[in-house]
Amino acid sequence: MIVGLTSIRMAVWQRWGGFLTGLVLLVTGVWWWIDQDLLLNDPTGVAILLIKLHGIVAAIGLLWLGGLLSTHVRVAWQRRRNIGSGLFALLLMALLCGSGVGLYYASYEIREVLHGLHFWLGLAVALVVPLHVVLGRLKRVKVKR
């Protein structure tokens, strides 16, 4: 047993902080995609603030993810609970982080490819993480019975 960590469930502030962070990232990412890719607007004013907010909140999301790895993931791994969807969610988040770094630092040609990949990975994370939560809650109910 990990000393001091007995529950897989995250603290309320951690759970809701993660949900809020994810929601802001989803909204700003989709808004940017609509504004820049569908409407083909020039990145000015609100759009620039939007992508800056997206980047700042992404940094907060990485801090949240680090906290998640050291608590929730460690305990769940030790207990072998909800590992499949958890590993899939972590893989998608890792790819999302990598593509985000690439959007900032890679050459123009590579950024063009990463742009679409990053958007679709973000949508996948937005679907897989809630699915992971629901599966975990369903499994928790089964274990309690």
Image (spheres, rainbow, N blue to C red):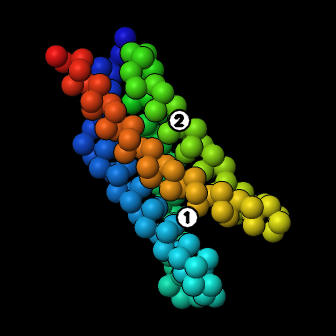
Q: Position of residue 22 (x, y in %)?
A: 42, 55
Q: Is residue 106 left or right of residue 72?
A: right
Name the residue at the left extreme. Answer: 145
Q: Nearer the viewer, residue 38 or 3?
A: 38
What number is the disc on residue 89?
none
Q: Secondary structure at mark 2?
A: helix
Q: Nearer the viewer, mark 1 or mark 2?
A: 2
Quarter of the image where one finds residue 144: top left
What's the CA distance linking mark 1 and mark 2?
23 Å
Q: Position of residue 132 (x, y in %)?
A: 39, 37
Q: Is residue 125 left or right of residue 134?
A: right
Q: Position of residue 66 (x, y in %)?
A: 49, 39
Quarter of the image where one finds residue 21: bottom left
Bin the neighbour count of mark 2 within 10 Å (Cα to Cα): few under 14, some 14-19, many 20 and up. Answer: some
What number is the disc on residue 55?
1
Q: Can you see residue 40? A: yes
Reading the chain from its start, which is encountered first: label 1 or label 2? 1
Q: Is residue 80 above or below residue 59?
A: above
> Which residue sits at x=74%, y=61%?
113
**Which amino acid type corresponds to the residue marked 2 in the rendered image?**
Phe
Q: Nearer the viewer, residue 116 or 97?
A: 116
> Which residue sits at x=57%, y=84%?
39
Q: Nearer the viewer, residue 116 or 12?
A: 116
Q: Secondary structure at mark 1?
A: helix
What number is the disc on residue 88?
2
Residue contact between numbered discs 1 and 2, judged by CB atoms under 8 Å? no
Quarter placement of the N terminus = top left
> Which residue sits at x=75%, y=66%?
112
Q: Is residue 83 above or below residue 131?
A: above
**Which amino acid type corresponds to the residue marked 1 in the rendered image?**
Gly
Quarter of the image where one finds residue 43: bottom right
